[in-house]
Amino acid sequence: MLLIYCPYCEEERSELEFRGAGDAHIARPENIADITDEEFEEYFFLRQNPKGLIFERWRHIHGCGRFFNAARDTVSDRFYTTYKAGEPKPDVSDILQSEQNKGAAK
Amino acid sequence: MADQVTVSRKAALTARGGSAEAILTPATAATRISLRAGAEALPALSAALGVTLPTRPKTSASSGQRHALWIGPDEWLVFDESEADLMAAAASSGTLHSAADISHRNVAVIVSGPGANVAINSGCPQDLSLAIFPVGGCSRTILGKAEIILFRTAEDQFRVECWRSFSPFVFGLLSEGAADAGY
Ligand SMILES: [Zn+2]
């Protein structure tokens, strides 16, 4: 069973309490009535679906109910880190560097 | 003109159950509110409710028959076992808040005995060891396919709150877990 650290409950909980909610840090255009169909498509539908590190929204739906963000590896399903909604997106190189350090320490 | 009839309340759960290791008892009727409020409203709301709304995850506060359970950063379950009017109490605070009367939406099962944690863990993934889930600890979580709110009222006793229509399922799953708790 996958354990996910909820930044609001401040502990790891079973994946059964959570629900994924798509990519994180996608800003809704402020002039949404003015943008072209292509720009809307880009904002609304198109996602990178990367192999490896991805930033996602998750919701602790059967816990505190809060949305939060997570950096997850799409290959291993490992959660690198989770953080509260509204907090800045962590630096990718920092995440990967700290993973390397953990690996080296083993 | 139609004759007036007096209806009586039909309890969702009536029978006791469980095993020697984990006894299952339907909780008595209680009033309940689902309370949402911002930090600035908490002192006045706490004073009006007569119980200090907890602000740390998984913690609760009790005053006599009244209990306030932290559910989320701005959400509490407040219930009163003497069926006092919680809606009126919250409204008297004069604060900006949302209180929904869920007295009859939820029912609760009391799970008690040395195998109470084992019975609940048959369908709930939370760590119920005393260090992680101490007496007074509470959490919204799941039991099988049902969402529950778990409240540890003693080392060997939990209150399991669930939505009324899920209560036969919750009671049934807890019964299975209670039967297994002795092995
Ligand atoms: Zn949470």
Image (cartoon, grey):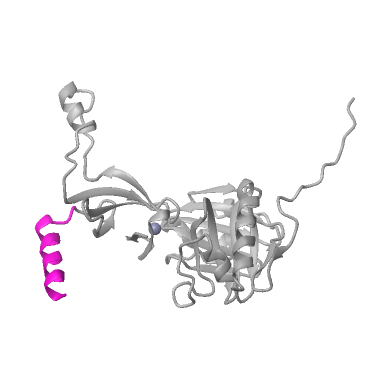
Give yes or no for residue A103 being in the magenta stretch: yes
Residue B45: x percent and y percent? 52, 58
Locate the C terminus of chain B and report the quarter of the image it occupies.
bottom right
Left or right relative to A68: residue B147: right
Ligand 1 in which quarter: bottom left
- Quarter of the figure with residue B72: bottom left
Kindly report the secondary structure that dominates the magenta region of the rendered protein. Answer: helix
A44 or B44: which is nearer to us?
Answer: A44
- Would residue B76 be seen by someone viewing this image from the given angle? yes
Left or right relative to B38: residue B164: right
Residue B117: x percent and y percent? 55, 70
Residue B22: x percent and y percent? 64, 70
Give the tally of numbered discs: 0
Q: Which residues are magenta?
A: A89-106
- Would residue B89 be seen by someone viewing this image from the given angle? no
Locate the N terminus of chain B and report the quarter of the image it occupies.
top right
Give yes or no for residue B43 being in the magenta stretch: no
Residue B60: x percent and y percent? 52, 67
Q: From what the image shows, is residue B175 above or below residue A34?
A: below
Left or right relative to B48: residue B1: right
Q: Residue at x 29, y 48 (%)?
A: A57
B65 or B7: which is nearer to us?
Answer: B7
- Quarter of the figure with residue B28: bottom right
